[in-house]
Image: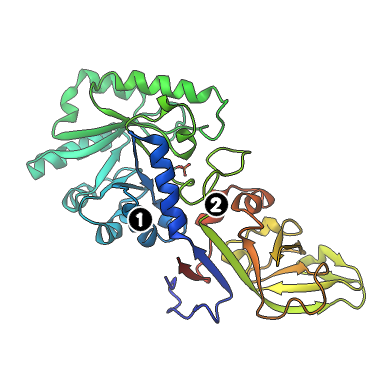
Amino acid sequence: MDGGFGGQFDSDTAAGLLTVDLAALRENYRALAARLAPVRAAAVVKADGYGLGASRVAPAVFDAGCRDFFVAHFHEALPLKAVLPIEARLFVLNGLHPGAEARCAAAGIIPVLNSLEQLQAWSSCAETFGRELPAVLQFDTGMSRLGLSETDAQALATEPTLLRGIHLLFVMSHLASADDPDNPQNREQLAELHRFAARFPGIGLCLSNSGGIFLDTDFHGALARPGIALYGGAPTANSPSPMRPVVRLDVRVIQTRNVPAEARVGYSGTYVAKAGTRLATIAAGYADGLPHALSNRGAAYFDGTRLPIVGRVSMDTITLDASALPTGAMKPGSLVEIIGPNQSLERIATDAGTISYEILTRLGRRYHRQYC
Ligand SMILES: *Cc1c(COP(=O)(O)O)cnc(C)c1O
């Protein structure tokens, strides 16, 4: 993946190396599938496979046995159709915009229907095509985000022809608090989904994201939809991730300097380095997905040594306090670890005041990406 820069970010000249461990990803898929068995595990590969490259990630999990793939937008599904074998099923979480139905049906992509409008449009598309079209029906059980409401469900019960031409594969909902096992909202949502699903006997449930897979088995339904756990992120908040890390990010040092007398560092001089401090400037900043909120917070690692971020994060650079290293240990061209064995994805997300999902999906396009 060259991110539109004509492939010039080769591993020797790139400012940063983003390594995606596809073997670890496959292992994470197999671990989740084993936990769920006999329930099936899909893979959520929206937002370009959580920033890691859906065209690489999806075939890798297919090889590990995955056959069901969820994206957010119809346009994310089309390119995956081209890289996945014909047995793979592609689902569109956000459903379809009015007018996209015929293209979706022609491409054999399966929408999640989130409203009566989407349901009606898919049903009339089936009529036009003269055959049944598959779909997932989502109900809102407590997020107020997407899905049919109780009123919609009643309308559907009195007017079952709304489902004409639709081959219903799953009844779906989404958990708001699955990363918090003690949150009573989980059971409330499960009970709500069972109430909705009672109107569709024999149709399997599709409920759990990564967090839901680590709740009781009654949350597992018939098909689970893990995302973050596949990519090594923690499925449960405030607990270390039981998954294998998939991402490693190393960034090159551009320049090192000794501070002879007290000196301000970075924009607005928010940090003042003492005389004798050794600084290192590295070649990535907020344009590469390292949040501005890491200004004077968090760290990078070199040979296992923690080097605190000092001053503001710039667009293309970050300055580190490298005083803990022996003189000469770090040189221009050296690589420092941003995500890796010393610093987890969760650690950097917490330091930036965000979540692992946001760090992954914003990883910049200027890194050399290598898949192993
Ligand atoms: C993103 C998403 C998922 C995956 O969630 P994770 O927490 O990453 O496992 C599952 N279902 C829906 C509806 C989603 O939007």
From the image, tell me which residue sits under label 2: 358
Q: Earlier in the sequence, mark 1 or mark 2?
A: 1
Quadrant of residue 127 within the rendered picture: top left
Amino acid at the residue labelled 1: Ala
Closest to the observer, 150 or 210? 210
| In this rendering, position of residue 307 left or right of residue 224 | right
Extreme-left residue of the structure: 130
- Residue 247's label in the rendered image is none
Q: How many marks?
A: 2
* Element marked by disc 1: helix
Q: Residue at left 36%, top 32%?
A: 147
Quadrant that contains the C terminus:
bottom left
Q: Residue 134: percent from the left, percent from the top?
A: 20, 39
Closest to the observer, 77 or 253? 253
Q: Residue at left 21%, top 47%?
A: 101
Q: Residue at left 69%, top 57%?
A: 294
* Element marked by disc 2: helix
Density class for disc 1 (Cα within 10 Å; few <14, some 14-19, many ≥20) is: many
Density class for disc 2 (Cα within 10 Å; few <14, some 14-19, many ≥20) is: some
Q: Residue at left 63%, top 38%?
A: 238
Q: Residue 337: percent from the left, percent from the top?
A: 64, 65
From the image, tell me which residue sits under label 1: 58
